[in-house]
Image (spheres, coloured by chain):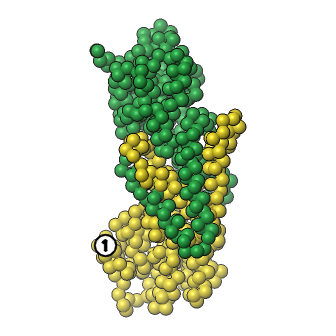
Chain colours: A yellow, B green
Amino acid sequence: MNSTTVRRVTVLGTGVIGTSIALALRRAGIHVALSDQDVGSLATAECMGAGIALMPGDPPADLVVIATPPSTVVSVLRDAQARGLGAVYTDVASTKARISAEAELAGCDLTSYVPGHPMAGRELSGPHAAHADLFAGRPWALCPHPATSPEAVRVVAEMVAVCGGAARILAPDAHDRVVAAVSHAPHLVSAALAARFAGADATTLSLVGRGLQDTTRIATGAPGLWCDILEQNAESVATVLEAVVRDLTEAASALRRSDRARSGALADLLTRGNRGREHIVAA
Amino acid sequence: MNSTTVRRVTVLGTGVIGTSIALALRRAGIHVALSDQDVGSLATAECMGAGIALMPGDPPADLVVIATPPSTVVSVLRDAQARGLGAVYTDVASTKARISAEAELAGCDLTSYVPGHPMAGRELSGPHAAHADLFAGRPWALCPHPATSPEAVRVVAEMVAVCGGAARILAPDAHDRVVAAVSHAPHLVSAALAARFAGADATTLSLVGRGLQDTTRIATGAPGLWCDILEQNAESVATVLEAVVRDLTEAASALRRSDRARSGALADLLTRGNRGREHIVAA
């Protein structure tokens, strides 16, 4: 089989992720066509040098990147394949099992589709927040279906490498369990911490330090998009949250006691936290 | 009343906070005497240029900074006052109400004691982790007792300014409620997130991104010291944790449902998180 080199990419969706991919590809001299139903967003991405608007009659791309909200990916994929927009397709949605199953049910061509998820993002959204280095050194999950062709995986992995990302191949179910722990549940936990400050007074805010700034950074994020993501991965996220709730409930109850055992319960959680953090830092 | 300018400071405890204060004061040309029961820690701080070891017969300092663990502050203060080590005293412990009450019970001289708490820290401990800029631009709570003299407060505020910190005067009870929300409860929440990774496998760790790195940064921290801190502020921390638990329990239960109402519950939490985060960023 001949190896295609990626020369021509179409990016559907010019939000922060789609535009950042487009900028990284343009920097490498790859031709990029852009599409977005929001004409303002599309114009902004064009002005930033992310590519030019996709036109009817454009030749098929080597690769089509679907960078639209998770719940729209399957319909956008089916439509793009029906129009013959490209030879290979990938997406960037942060859940994979349900999208993969729905793509199969919808009759999409799975041989040319490589479900993907770059593990990078910004707390800001829209093309203005995009930059070409967003994926540098970041993991980028690829979750091929058994029917996906090896050549399609190779093409998408090449695009990931051009963006500076590190491709990781894993099964859709495993991906969703892992991102529930590393991204989706932390998002809700960060929101629950930040929510304590929704009506904060000046005295409280006068003592805010870097610890709270860091733990709540990801609490910025469009609620609509995040509901969409969380509902696509509901069971796995709930399982992680329930474990966090168990630990925090035990800590709160230890703090309400005044016996000597409470120190043990707190120390146990803090020690497990230390150990987990060591793994996270080493990752 | 004559205003004393701070020329001579004694720092008791050469951990990361005490040594950082000492380095900041030395940089401003202030004479610093150091003391620590751990001779290795003391020698390290001296080698770093944080000051010279306190010697018997040294003249009294303008200010004595007690930078020892929270549960030891009152006994160190009483002993330091009995030895006449200085004219004014402050500490850096991250809880204030109990220490203040115990200092009064222990018969400490409250006119010369200004309970303090710099809202800065490092996830690392020990003098090696110290640096002179640790407090630059950071809030530094001062919680004087009604008996504390205004001149003592002025002296400590001058030291805070030399360290680059921003002094905030507030009552001990208010301080403790605020730090429960901005620091102590976030520490346990961060630990509960990090604890999910205590036994993490390679696949999970392969997808760790910046969001998890930030939300778990403060989960590094000596469990012993943190138990000490948390027990000194148990009620306030428990109250914040219980509110976080309520939000996360509701989110998990919404994720376990499959009706349309679940989106509303998630969006409510995410929206309150957005609003709280806006306040935190503006702070």
Q: Chain of mark 1?
A: A
Looking at the rendering, which quadrant does residue A234 occupy? bottom right
Considering depth in this image, is A206 or A140 the residue closer to the camera? Answer: A206
Q: Residue at x 59, y 70 (%)?
A: A233
Considering depth in this image, is B263 or B184 the residue closer to the camera? Answer: B263
**Does B248 appear above or below A52?**
above
The quarter of the image holding the C terminus of chain A is: bottom right
Q: Is residue A198 left or right of residue B248?
A: left
Residue B189 place in picture, x, y as percent: 57, 49
Q: Is residue A150 left or right of residue A162?
A: right
Looking at the rendering, which quadrant does residue B76 occupy? top right
**Does B278 appear above or below B114?**
below
Q: Residue at x 39, y 74 (%)?
A: A14
Residue B118 place in picture, x, y as percent: 44, 34
Q: Is residue B11 left or right of residue B281?
A: right
Q: Residue at x 49, y 14 (%)?
A: B81
Q: Few, some or many C-alpha atoms within 10 Å of disc 1 (few <14, some 14-19, many ≥20)?
A: some
**Does A273 appear above or below A33?**
above
Instruction: Please identify the residue farthest to the front as the structure is shown.
Output: B146
Residue B47 in sight: no
Q: Secondary structure at mark 1?
A: helix
The quarter of the image holding the N terminus of chain A is: bottom right
Residue A73 in sight: yes
Name the kind of residue labelled 1 in the image: Thr
Looking at the rendering, which quadrant does residue A176 occupy? bottom right
Residue A89 place in picture, x, y as percent: 51, 81
Residue A52 place in picture, x, y as percent: 33, 79
Considering depth in this image, is A183 or B29 the residue closer to the camera? Answer: A183
Instruction: Please identify the residue farthest to the top as the structure is shown.
Output: B57
In this figure, which residue is indicated by the disc labeled 1? Answer: A44
Q: Residue at x 39, y 55 (%)?
A: B278
